[in-house]
Image (cartoon, rainbow, N blue to C red):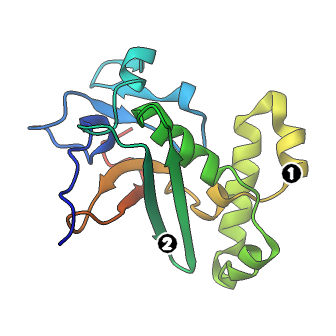
């Protein structure tokens, strides 16, 4: 018998007008400090109090989040002995995608996507102007293979008690 699914905090779920309190915008190419709540006429930084909310009802100290896109499969591991927070989840996602590609992962980039991945890499380096040279020297990172699909679209859990699935894509709510 599988254990029951946990109730994930609304900030970590796919946006739903009836359930979500606000629309959250997290680009996994950018650090957690850049997460914003968005509305039609505003963007405000997510407060520390909101980020530090428990990720689930009932204390959860370990969490695995799976991500799959094309030939790439990565696991995001979240741990906090005091109980996982939304910040812990966002930090772990950012850290996972901020890792340099291994030689094996580089070989997995489909030939027809190599130019787009290089363009995403150059754009990421430009976005961090004070660190552009440092970023460029570090080379391709996992986030680059996502190209423009770097927006957090929530976590889902397909079966009771199973690992979470990370959903990333393009911003679906206009500019």
Left/right of residue 142 with respect to residue 131 in the rendered view: left
**Which image quarter holds the C terminus?**
top left
In the rendered image, residue 129, in percent from the top left (x then y), is placed at 79, 31
Left/right of residue 150 with respect to residue 124 in the rendered view: left
Of residues 40 and 26, the one nearer the viewer is 26
Residue at the image position 33 percent from the left and 42 percent from the top: 12
State the image quarter where residue 146 is shown: bottom right
Residue at the image position 66 percent from the left and 60 percent from the top: 142
Up the image or down, 69 lies above or below 75; here it is below
Of residues 10 and 112, the one nearer the viewer is 10
Residue at the image position 30 percent from the left and 19 percent from the top: 41
State the image quarter where residue 22 is shown: top left
Which of the labelled discs sits on residue 138, or is there none?
Answer: 1
For label 1, the SS is helix
In the rendered image, residue 157, in percent from the top left (x then y), is placed at 27, 61
In the rendered image, residue 103, in percent from the top left (x then y), is placed at 82, 74
Up the image or down, 119 lies above or below 40; here it is below
**Which image quarter holds the N terminus?**
bottom left
Residue at the image position 43 percent from the left and 43 percent from the top: 61
In the rendered image, residue 16, in percent from the top left (x then y), is placed at 17, 43
- Spatial separation of the CA atoms under disc 2 and disc 1: 23 Å
Q: Which residue is mark 2?
A: 69
């Amino acid at each position: 018998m599988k254990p029951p699914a946990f109730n994930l905090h609304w900030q970590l779920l796919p946006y739903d007008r009836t359930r979500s309190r606000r629309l959250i915008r997290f680009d996994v190419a950018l650090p957690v400090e850049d997460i914003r709540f968005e509305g039609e006429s505003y963007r405000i930084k997510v407060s520390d109090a909101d980020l530090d909310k428990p990720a689930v009802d009932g204390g959860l100290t370990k969490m695995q989040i799976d991500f799959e896109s094309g030939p790439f499969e990565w696991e995001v591991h979240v741990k906090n002995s005091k109980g996982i927070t939304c910040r812990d989840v966002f930090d772990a996602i950012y850290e996972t995608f901020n890792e340099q590609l291994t030689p094996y992962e580089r070989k997995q980039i489909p030939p027809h996507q190599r130019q787009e991945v290089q363009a995403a890499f150059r754009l990421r380096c430009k976005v961090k102007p004070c660190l552009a040279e440092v970023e460029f020297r570090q080379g391709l990172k996992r986030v680059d293979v996502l190209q423009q699909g770097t927006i957090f679209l929530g976590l889902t859990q397909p079966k009771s008690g199973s690992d979470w699935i990370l959903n990333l894509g393009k911003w679906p709510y206009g500019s």
